[in-house]
Image (spheres, coloured by chain):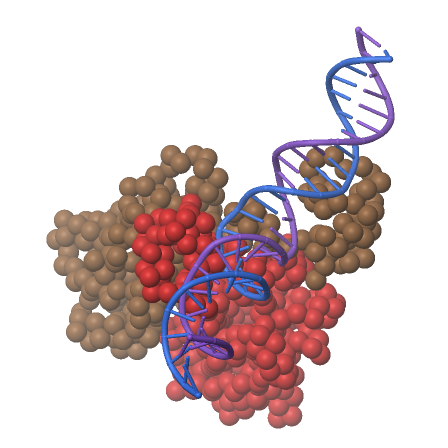
Chain colours: A brown, B red, C purple, D blue
Amino acid sequence: MAGIKDVAKLAGVGVGTVSRAINDTGYVSQEAKAKIDAAMEELHYIPNELARNLYRKKSGIIAVLVPTISHPFFAEFINYMELECHERGYKTMICSTEREKNYESEYLQMLRQHIVEGIITGVHSLDVQEYLEIDMPIVALDRFIGDNIPVVSVDHRQGGMRAARELIRCGCHKVAVFQEAKKVHSPAQARYEEFMRVLEESGIETISCELEWNKSDVAYFNQVTSEFFRKHPDVDGMFGTDLLALSYMKAAQENGKKIPEDLKIIAYDGTDIMDAVYPRMTMIRQPIEKLAKEAVRLIVHRIDGTNLLDKHIELESTFIKGNTTDN
Amino acid sequence: MAGIKDVAKLAGVGVGTVSRAINDTGYVSQEAKAKIDAAMEELHYIPNELARNLYRKKSGIIAVLVPTISHPFFAEFINYMELECHERGYKTMICSTEREKNYESEYLQMLRQHIVEGIITGVHSLDVQEYLEIDMPIVALDRFIGDNIPVVSVDHRQGGMRAARELIRCGCHKVAVFQEAKKVHSPAQARYEEFMRVLEESGIETISCELEWNKSDVAYFNQVTSEFFRKHPDVDGMFGTDLLALSYMKAAQENGKKIPEDLKIIAYDGTDIMDAVYPRMTMIRQPIEKLAKEAVRLIVHRIDGTNLLDKHIELESTFIKGNTTDN
DNA sequence: CCCAAATATGCAACCGTTTCCATATGAGTT
DNA sequence: AACTCATATGGAAACGGTTGCATATTTGGG
């Protein structure tokens, strides 16, 4: 591998001159530039980014922590995030934490090790302490971590309210709501609270089913929904995240229920795979692209040290009327 | 940020001794070790990985190139891949190329820049030349690139054959097959060939629909399938990848077709979101976890320079009988 | 008691860049 | 002619580690 010294030698100039030529900084004569270009060409020289990184103390990498990539919401989020990172000159590193142990601290280490410059975390860790101690570029996706860590999320309360109103409008009597583990401190909790509050205000019975922490695979969802359905076959309304809503619909249909006649379903998230299913789901769609862009914007600002003011960015979700509530 | 010199100074030893203590190489006395540990603790010292990388000429990062992360197959693949990489001590960088331009060369640069040590590419580029020139750690997922670049894929021919036989068994007369852009040189082409060959051998009419290159979003699929359905409402069998199969089923159901009575559908890929839909899809499931593990194994071997023999790893897919072919 | 081997350590060189600084040249000004 | 100032350049120091080498010091066997 040819280094900058080889280029300098071949071009008959000093390394400093080569470096200035490459980076277009300082003074370099036309003559020298030409010789350097020729030498670089001849040696197939490409600057070693490792060395640059060391000097600059920058890796140009942003990490994203998610429970699992294989979940439409996170997959879509990461997709948009990578786009935005790329646009801003950053690379994207992924870290999934859905394993036995809680791997978060390991990933946080990467910040101190200068492997990554910032972290966007969509992980619902239980041991939050570690984050609080660090004063480093961290942005949370839909999760409260600490006062100094900005959060990007949607207005869950509104989403919960809209879902509740829609089910009320459709005349539901007994509604199931699937919510994530309560020990997780997330803005999403407001969604369930508001959803249930509004329904109960209207005197509608609600049955909530708390999911296990950090489990979001389809096999688990199928197990939960079919079991739930067996216990509560008379439920006539349901609210849950995309895959869960799909899974519940499946459990119901397998048992001969008609959608939306016998059961109304509203899905939360509205990832785009939902557009491929029949019947068209009534959904509360999160603006995933915007979430991702905002998260990247915030983390880049943190990295640059500019604009540290933003604390909580709350975006609006969209209600999409489909055919799973009524026709 | 405290450096190794600070630790050395505080501990009253040389930097070499500190380095040896940290890395557990060479001789370090108990006494020195204790002092160093204390100093590291006091200074909250963590080795700068950037500096280590430079010396070792290793970044510890493997990149994965995909058209889009937001597609269940790739999302699942990346998920397992990240797991396996992590297990082997590598970080995972993602690069999506589903943008206007063909960004592959940019990402290939990362190898030369020493940003990543290896690349697993699931991208269906058109300009293959660049790969061929490079003799670097590259592994292709389901795609032929060049003689020196190993491929990990499934036995598509068998998958195509099974799907065809199933549709024959169900008595289809006119079958639709959606296939990726023909200009892509991928092992998957064998699937369509075999599928159509077997059907035509039985005298069954086939209509093939070629998809645009590098388009795999649901909106596009919906557009394609609804248009196709309008043109060919009398088709009674269909074969396509997961989302496409879902989208097609949706188009059919929206037009009052009964599944599987009026139309038989077989999905290829079998990502796990498919387990959440009703009716249960008849599928050819790719062993995504194994694909990912094999791809990582190969790339790591290439990086280490051990075992450069493997050229083409071909895994078996699984036929899963669901209720979209018959009950 | 002596010498080889094992243990222990500090210092300098190195990894491949970037940037600072000292120095040089030539053009334009007074 | 002397003095700026812009242009141009090479070499050294720095980034923060790791490792080779020279040099103790200790240990143990004959």
Q: Nearer the viewer, residue C20 or A83?
A: C20
Looking at the image, residue D19 lies above or below residue A143: below
Q: Quadrant of residue A226?
A: bottom left
Q: Residue B196's spot in the image, x, y percent?
A: 63, 85
Q: Which residue corresponds to the image point at 55% horizontal and 50% vertical from the top-left?
A: A54
Q: Residue B191's spot in the image, x, y percent?
A: 61, 82
Q: Residue B17's spot in the image, x, y percent?
A: 44, 59
Where does the N terminus of chain B fall, quadrant-wise? Answer: top left
Q: Nearer the viewer, residue A258 or A233?
A: A233
Q: Nearer the viewer, residue A310 or A270?
A: A310
Q: Which residue corresponds to the image point at 50% horizontal and 75% vertical from the top-left?
A: B292
Q: Along the horizontal axis of the image, is C3 left or right of B145?
A: left
Q: Quadrant of residue B214?
A: bottom right
Q: Which residue corresponds to the image point at 31% horizontal and 71% vertical from the top-left?
A: A100
Q: Quadrant of residue D20?
A: bottom right
Looking at the image, residue A25 lies above or below residue A55: above
Looking at the image, residue A165 lies above or below residue B210: above
Q: Nearer the viewer, residue B183 or A15?
A: A15
Q: Along the horizontal axis of the image, is D17 left or right of C14?
A: left
